[in-house]
């Protein structure tokens, strides 16, 4: 039997039936309503102004979502009691979960209420006791401690129980992440190119490249800068920077492993021939000038000798005339 109390105004009348206060319902069930007061009625047709607490069928004003969850039909209850496949509840989080996350522990296993482990803990018995840590952290006395990475690594993970046997997952500023080896480098090796502080793979035929391969208008551009052994780099306007075993039509192989346009070679030869002819002409002009200078000098010397002989002859004649006289 319900006792009369005066703790709240509506509780002066513990149960109402046909607008009368009664101690028990004559035929119907007691409808528990914490907002309007308890009354006699049919639970199957019970309606609440705010929320119905499931499975107790109590009308309540507020649904405590730290533990309970609200349904679209204004029912409030544990996830496992709301007739859904999602039975798990994370405390203080909205909604229900179908599968239990790995990084959680039970606050109440019977009620299927969970809480998350520490951020760096993968599996725990409680928030204070971790059993397994995520990568980059190691377990010490139930706590996850960040690992100390070697060399140029900012983050790393262990390959085995040997802490020195690590691979980088992130590099310190200024270093390039070489994912294939798990290293952080000052420069990317051959067959890789720099890509936002990552070493990304070139096309398989490239020895070095400016960036990765592309496809433009159904034409592959390998973007090579040099080629693997026994291949030639197409270095000609209108052609993609590809490495090939045979040069395409319109180009010729060169000794330094390039495919060059044929016209380019002819232009180079013509330019070379022109320079040779210019050199020959200038050399010839210089030689002719030198020869003319020599000839002129010789003529000048011959003229001086003739004048000297004439002077001597004149003096001899004058001497003879004086003797005869």
Image: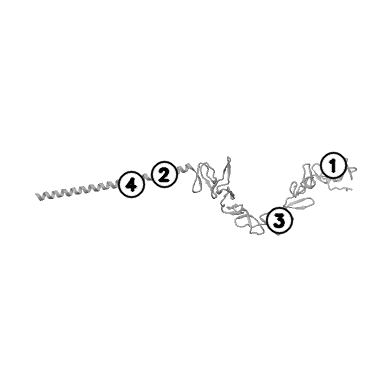
In the image, is 4 to the left or to the right of 225? right
The answer to the question of whether label 3 and label 4 lie on touching residues, with beta carbons closer than 8 A, is no
In the image, is 292 to the left or to the right of 149? left
| Element type where label 4 sits in the image | helix
Instruction: Report, in whole angstroms, how far the alpha carbon at label 2 lies from the one at label 1.
Output: 108 Å
Q: Nearer the viewer, residue 7 or 235?
A: 235
Crowd band around label 1 with a 10 angstrom C-alpha radius: few (<14), some (14–19), many (20+): few
**Can residue 291 be seen in this snapshot?**
yes
Tell me where residue 78 appears, x and y as whole percent.
79, 47
Tell me where residue 100 appears, x and y as whole percent.
74, 50
In the image, is 51 to the left or to the right of 219? right
- Residue at position x 23%, y 48% from top? 302
| Element type where label 3 sits in the image | strand
Give the residue at mark 4.
287
Instruction: Report, in whole angstroms, how far the alpha carbon at label 2 lies from the one at label 3.
Output: 78 Å
Instruction: Report, in whole angstroms, how far the alpha carbon at label 1 lies from the one at label 3.
Output: 48 Å
Number of numbered discs visible in the structure rendering: 4
Tell me where residue 236 appears, x and y as whole percent.
51, 43
| Visual colour scheme | one colour
Instruction: Report, in whole angstroms, how far the alpha carbon at label 2 lies from the one at label 4.
Output: 21 Å
Give the residue at mark 3.
132
Q: Residue 273 carries which label?
A: 2
Q: Which mark is residue 44?
A: 1
| Element type where label 1 sits in the image | helix
Of the two numbered discs 2 and 1 on the same chain, state the one appearing first in sequence. Answer: 1
- Residue at position x 75%, y 51% from top? 114
Crowd band around label 2 with a 10 angstrom C-alpha radius: few (<14), some (14–19), many (20+): few
């Amino acid at each position: 039997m319900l006792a009369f109390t005066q703790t709240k105004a509506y509780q002066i009348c513990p149960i109402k039936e046909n607008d009368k206060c009664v101690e028990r319902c004559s035929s119907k069930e007691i409808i528990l309503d914490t907002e309007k007061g308890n009354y006699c009625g049919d639970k199957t047709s019970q309606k609440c102004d705010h929320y119905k607490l499931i499975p107790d069928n109590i009308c309540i004003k507020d649904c405590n979502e730290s533990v309970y969850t609200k349904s679209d039909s204004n029912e409030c209850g544990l996830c496992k009691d709301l007739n859904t496949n999602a039975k798990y509840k994370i405390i203080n989080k909205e909604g229900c979960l179908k599968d239990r996350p790995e990084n959680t522990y039970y606050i109440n296993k019977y009620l299927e209420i969970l809480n998350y482990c520490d951020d760096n803990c993968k599996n725990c018995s409680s928030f204070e006791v971790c059993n397994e840590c995520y990568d980059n952290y190691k377990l010490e006395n139930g706590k996850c401690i960040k690992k100390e990475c070697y060399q140029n690594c900012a983050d790393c993970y262990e390959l085995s129980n040997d802490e020195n046997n690590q691979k980088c997952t992130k590099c310190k500023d200024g270093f390039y992440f070489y994912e294939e080896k798990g290293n952080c480098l000052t420069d990317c090796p051959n067959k890789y190119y720099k890509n936002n502080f990552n070493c990304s793979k070139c096309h398989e035929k490239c020895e070095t490249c400016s960036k990765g391969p592309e496809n433009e208008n159904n034409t592959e551009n390998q973007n090579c800068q040099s080629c693997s052994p026994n291949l030639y780099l197409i270095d000609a306007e209108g052609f993609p920077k590809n490495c090939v075993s045979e040069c395409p039509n319109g180009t010729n192989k060169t000794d330094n492993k390039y495919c060059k346009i044929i016209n380019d070679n002819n232009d180079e030869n013509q330019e070379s021939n022109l320079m040779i002819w210019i050199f020959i002409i200038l050399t010839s002009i210089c030689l002719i000038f030198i020869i003319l200078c020599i000839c002129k000098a010789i003529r000048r010397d011959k003229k001086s000798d003739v004048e000297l002989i004439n002077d001597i002859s004149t003096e001899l004649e004058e001497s003879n005339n004086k003797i005869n006289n």
